[in-house]
Each structure stands twice: as C-alpha cells, then as structure tokens.
Amino acid sequence: MPVMSVIDATAHSMTPAMLEGRKLTPEERSQLAETGLNATVLIHRTIANASNWREAHAALQLYLRADTESPSYLREQIVSVRMLQLILSGPERDADAMAAIAQYTELLSKNRSPEGALLVQALQTLKGYWTPEQIADAAQGGMVGIEAFLARRTCPDCADKQHSPAINAKVQAGEDVFLMQIEHALDQLKAMSTL
C-alpha cells in the first residue's frame, strides 16, 4: 500500500472541530493520526482481500458498525472514499452498485468530506437515481467540507519545516495541485447545489 494513500486518508478528513473552525490540539492531532492510520490499514487490507467490490462492501459494512476505536466520521470518510474509488472505477451500475454509491456519497456529504472531485463524480453517476433535491443537498454538504478545508489551509506558516527544501517544494507542489482540484470541485458542487 503506498504511504501517500495512508497519509491522504487522514490528512484530508475533516473533524467536527475543524468544521467549526477550531484547531486541533497536538494531542488531538496525534490521536486522529493514530486511529486514522489504524483504520486506513484495516480498510485497505479488507479491500485487498476481497474478491470484488461487493465482498469488500459487505465486510466494510460490518466494520463500520463494529469499530469503536476510531471516530465514526473518520472511518465513514475513509471507507466511503476507498469504496467510491473502487466502485466508480468499474463498469457496474446495477441496483446494488447504485445503492452502494448512494450510501457512500451520503456518508461523504454528511461528514463534510473535502473529497470534492470524488463527490462530483459520484453525484454525476447518481443523476437519475437520486432526485435533484438529493443531489443538491449532497453537493451542499460537500461544499461545506471543502470550504472548511480551504479555510484551514490558508496558513502561510503551516508548511512542514522538518524536511529538506527539495522535499518541502515537492510537498508544496502536490498540495497546490490538490488545492486546484478541490477548488474546481467546489465550483462544480456549487452548480449542482442549485435546483
């Protein structure tokens, strides 16, 4: 499993405190990172061990109900991101696939995930399956998550100064691309949120 996917899963998750504009304490950040990493590893293993998305879906439904270590918003976001990536990358759009896409999209929206590009793709897939009102509501939830994420990313001193200048430059370039992607997704979600 690539290290970046583990880091991304927890780095882009929005906590209730973040959505309220409160910064996490170092202890809260550490706890979030630890539980997020544990959850991410378990989720990646579950998906890797499944023979198809349906088997992974069934196993992760049990996990979502059984895990008491990680906060529900965190595990729901990580599971939703990974499962939407898996299902949307395949051709299946039968009733079971659409129901799963709808469920994971609802979780991303409910938890105000900043995964805007994925949410846009899911909402485009759900057109005709969901009502325009459902699409608009989910888009609005995604907008809140992206706006909160962008608000907390506008700190000029937030860059990690522990790495070499070359690594910091690469990290910044990656962040710049990600920010452009979610800003574009925000524009798309705004358009989808109006009836």
Image (cartoon, grey):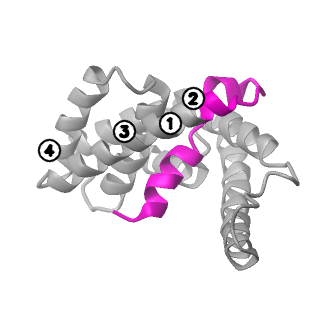
Q: Looking at the image, is mark 4 or mark 2 earlier in the sequence?
A: 4
The magenta segment? 1-29
Amino acid type, label 2: Glu
Callout in the foreground (1, 3): 3
Q: Is residue 106 above or below residue 152?
A: above
Q: Which residue is mark 2?
A: 133
19 drawn magenta: yes
Which residue matches tag 4?
Answer: 55
Q: CA distance from mark 4 to mark 1?
A: 21 Å
Query: Residue shown at 71%/72% (left/top)?
Result: 173
- The three-letter code of the residue at mark 4 reads Glu
Amino acid carrying mark 1 in the image: Leu
Q: Secondary structure at mark 4?
A: helix
Given this view, does label 4 or label 3 mark the residue nearer the observer? 3
Q: Secondary structure beneath disc 3?
A: helix
Neighbours of disc 3 within 10 Å: few (<14), some (14-19), many (20+)? many
Secondary structure state at the residue bearing disc 2? helix
Q: Report how far apart the C-alphas of labels 3 and 2 lie in the structure.
A: 32 Å
Q: Earlier in the sequence, mark 3 or mark 2?
A: 3
Which numbered disc covers residue 39? 3
